[in-house]
Amino acid sequence: MFDQLPETFRSFKLNADVRTLLRLRQAMDKGLVSTLGDMFYVLKGLITTSPTDIGPFSKAFYAHFLDIDILPGEPLDKAILRSNAFKEWKDKLSSDEKEDIEDLELVDQFLDEVHLTSYDIKKFLDGKDILDKDDPSLKDKDAPGDNPASDRHHVLDRMADYRDIPLEELMRRMREVAKQQKTRHEGGDHWIGSGGVSPYGNGGAAAGGIRVGGAGGGKMARAAINNRDFYPADAKAPLGDDNVDAALAALKGIEEGSSEIILDVPLTIKEGLKQGGIFLPYEKEKRQQRIQVILMIDNGGWSMSPYIRVVQKLFAKMKTRFAHDLKTYYFHNTIYGGLYTDAARSQFAPLDKINLQDKNYTVFVIGDADMAPYELHRSSIRDWQKLSKHFKRMAWLNPMSEGEWYASMTCSVIKQIFPMFELTPEGIESAVLEMNKLKGNGW
């Protein structure tokens, strides 16, 4: 396999020869390579000399090690989808694992496993140590360790592990760093850049960080913000493809649990023996952690059409990443005796049937709540109130900015029934915090 490696990379117009093999062997002898993910990073450091080399390098790498044949002009993900390696991997998945997952997400999952990396490297860095010593509010010119981007070549010989740091904390720090950043940076452990061990950026070696722009190298990031205009994602902007991962991080904060009282058999026996055979039942609380979500989407009017796809994408991602029960209903402007179980609104579900669902469901209603006053008549208001009475943890997410709510009479009425938040990552986070607060009050 390794004898043909230089030839493979040269066929993609990259510089590789026997010296590449010698340096690779040195890296392996030093313990820098133990998995395919390690091999990717070491070879990238040896072969690529400019950003334009990364695309051809990735294609050559997958062609050589996974026998993925990339046709001229064909994107890598399309080549992976038709490769035998991917098909064999996909065949091993259960039907549940493949359900509701788009092909491109399966490609990401495939690459995650292919690149699973242990990084047995002498210079292994603890992400917590880096962040403890780092001040995210440093001015651009004052931060140590990073240098402005240049044409110099970085050899990756170290890696930082941020997997134990909460994603919300990394997002918070990234926002602070972004406020101070004025220039593009490369290498180091502080800025949003490339080629280093910073928890935010691309092309570096940071397990469990946030990929910002660029392509995924080792596929180790927990979140990805792919539009380079967002450094970081704008949490106050309306929900869109560019900040959907930030909203997903907020949804992860949903805290749910149920409890039931069961007989504590060991304690009952133990205490009964102490009492000379008088066995009095001792009970204990059994707690079960689970996430149950109901999504109610207004998909009937032109004002909501820009948001339907991204909302469905957000909650579909939630379904694939967090084990939970997700039910989706649809309505147009408001509800009249029930909702619909299909997007075409042909399968009607009466309100009484919906209210038979477990009251512990967390319910998100997505809509602008803006309609003609005659549409929100008394019977419709009573229907919303019935839902609010049954499901104690409900929140309305509105794509209209908060300043526009007060100009709509119907929006003001609905706002008195449910807590209402903007349909932004920040608004979703506030909704989750509010509903967790309701849980803490015994709801």
Image (spheres, rainbow, N blue to C red):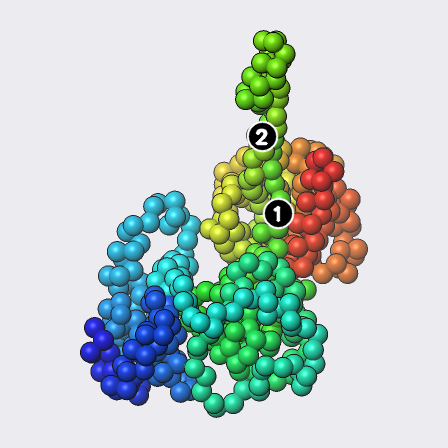
- The residue type indicated by label 2 comes to Lys
| Secondary structure under the numbered disc 1 in the rendered image | loop
Point out residue 134 in the picture as x, y percentages from the top left corner: 65, 72
Point out residue 194 in the picture as x, y percentages from the top left corner: 51, 78
| Secondary structure under the numbered disc 2 in the rendered image | strand
Image point (41%, 56%), residue name: 102
Q: Can residue 331 be seen here? A: no
Spatial CA span between label 1 and label 2: 20 Å
Q: Residue furthest top?
A: 277
Q: Give above or below for 36 relative to 375.
A: below
Q: Nearer the viewer, residue 196 or 168?
A: 196
- The residue type indicated by label 1 comes to Ile
Q: Which residue is mark 2?
A: 286
Say which label, 1 or 2, has the lower sequence index: 1
Q: Which residue is mark 1?
A: 254
Q: Give above or below for 275 relative to 257.
A: above
Point out residue 148 in the picture as x, y percentages from the top left corner: 57, 87
Q: Nearer the viewer, residue 169 or 371?
A: 169
